[in-house]
Amino acid sequence: MTVQTNLQLYNQLAAAGFQVREIQQVDVAYGAALRLFTGRYRANGKPFSAHLVGTSSILARHGAALDVIIAGLLHATYLQGEFGSGKPGASPNRRRWMRQFVSSEVDELLVAYAQFPWKPKHLAQLAPEVTSLPERTRKVLFMRIANALEDQLDFAAQFSAKKHRDGGQGKSREEWGIEIGTALGHEALAGELKAELNQVAWVGAEALKKPASGSFLVAPRSHRVKWLPGLRFGFRKAIQRIKAK
């Protein structure tokens, strides 16, 4: 497995010349990621938090700015983050909550990432004019390509049904990512994605495909308590809080 830990990411950032206060911003964002993605796994069974750190590490390794690195660490916030309602989306309340942990620019990148249609048809339309796109859109594409590479590294894409949605559309989203990444000046990143694209886990892995989202949630047992034990537990916690005052 190519799982990278948050400490490895911080060491990587320090080696790249980022200051302590900047690495502390990444650590605060990592704390938010743990709140939003605990219990979520990629299609290959890898903890989602490890996927987030891996994507952020790829961005750092390829020279991304701090806001892009932090946004890469939280890239799926408004797509798959658990805010308590079980529904995706960037509501005003959620965005206010996120801005406790990240800057306004990072939050804007997270919203743009969630809204970006990462599909072959849309990418085919963007490709001819990619260098003239707004800076924020180019940053989102950088994040998307890094995310695609991270998926390939641990075979998550082999276990996901996402790739089958691209069938019959010519180039896949990853192949468009290679072309667009090259056009944006991320040749090394595009080269890594190209090298990993056709790797396979083993014959028959497609039989293990997970839902089309490419990830799944396994909630802790405490999130599934029956109503009576849950009521008792809540009552005890309330008494403890009253006594603590």
Image (cartoon, rainbow, N blue to C red):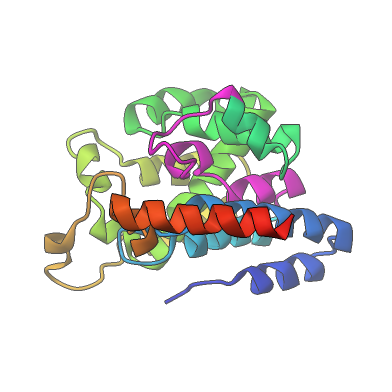
Say which quarter of the image contains residue 85: top left
At x 31%, y 64%, the residue is 44
At x 71%, y 45%, the residue is 101
Residue 35 position within the rendered picture, expressed as x and y whole percent measured from the top left:
55, 53
* Nearer the observer, 183 or 219: 219
Residue 31 position within the rendered picture, expressed as x and y whole percent measured from the top left:
65, 57
* Nearer the observer, 167 or 238: 238
In the figure, 66 relative to 14: above or below?
above
Say which quarter of the image contains residue 168: top left
Image side of residue 15 versus residue 98, left or right: right
Q: How many marks?
A: 0
State the extent of the magenta-drawn residues as a range: 64-92
Residue 11 position within the rendered picture, expressed as x and y whole percent measured from the top left:
74, 73
Residue 134 position within the rendered picture, expressed as x and y whole percent measured from the top left:
65, 24
Residue 80 part of the magenta segment: yes
In the figure, 43 relative to 99: above or below?
below
Q: Residue furthest bottom?
A: 1
